[in-house]
Image (cartoon, rainbow, N blue to C red):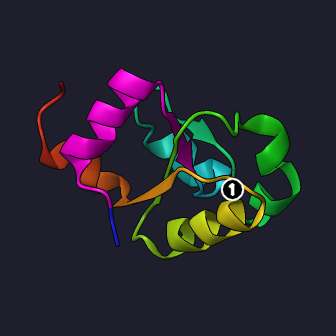
Amino acid sequence: MFIPCEDAKRLIKSSNAQLVDVRTPEEFASSKLPGAINIPLQDIDRVGASMLDQSRPVIVFCRSGQRSHMAMQILLSQSFTDVHNLGSFMAWHQCADL
């Protein structure tokens, strides 16, 4: 299940949620979302817990939603409790900024 872009933007604004792009560094370099950090899927299980604050919500995204779904599952298995899947980075542009 994907979080609607309005809810994702609201969560970032109200709860200082962390926006995590799990695409490759090359994909990240070609099109970045404002405020997003890049932790590629292949690295999320190794560095996710050290790079992210478990006390803040996490919103993951990728190109299609598949990698971000896997990343969400990995973070949940690492004791993160508030993780959301935006799906495709294109979803970000489907709603107005708050």
* Total marks placed: 1
If the image is split into quadrants, where does the C terminus sit? top left
Q: Nearer the viewer, residue 40 or 77?
A: 77
| Magenta segment | 3-21
- Tell me the quarter of the picture where residue 52 sits: top right
Q: Is residue 16 magenta?
A: yes
Q: Nearer the viewer, residue 5 or 22?
A: 5
Q: Which residue does the image show at 69% across and 40% down from the upper left?
A: 54
- Give the image location of residue 67, x and y in percent: 55, 71
Q: In the rendered view, does 38 fall on the left or right side of 27?
A: right
If the image is split into quadrants, where does the N terminus sit? bottom left
Q: Nearer the viewer, residue 86 or 27?
A: 86
Determine crowd level at label 1: few under 14, some 14-19, many 20+ residues with C-alpha closer than 10 A: many
- Tell me the quarter of the picture where residue 70 sits: bottom right
Q: Which residue does the image show at 48% across and 76% down from the upper left?
A: 66
The answer to whether residue 16 is above or below residue 19 is above
- Give the image location of residue 15, x and y in percent: 43, 27
Q: In the rendered view, does 35 fall on the left or right side of 76?
A: left
Determine whether the residue tagged by mark 1 lies in a helix, strand or loop.
loop
Q: Which residue does the image show at 66% across and 63% down from the upper left?
A: 76
Q: Is residue 86 magenta?
A: no
What is the three-letter code of the residue carrying label 1? Pro
The answer to whether residue 94 is above or below residue 11 is below
Q: Which residue does the image show at 66% across and 49% down from the upper left?
A: 25
The answer to whether residue 80 is above or below residue 30 is below
- From the image, tell me which residue sits under label 1: 40
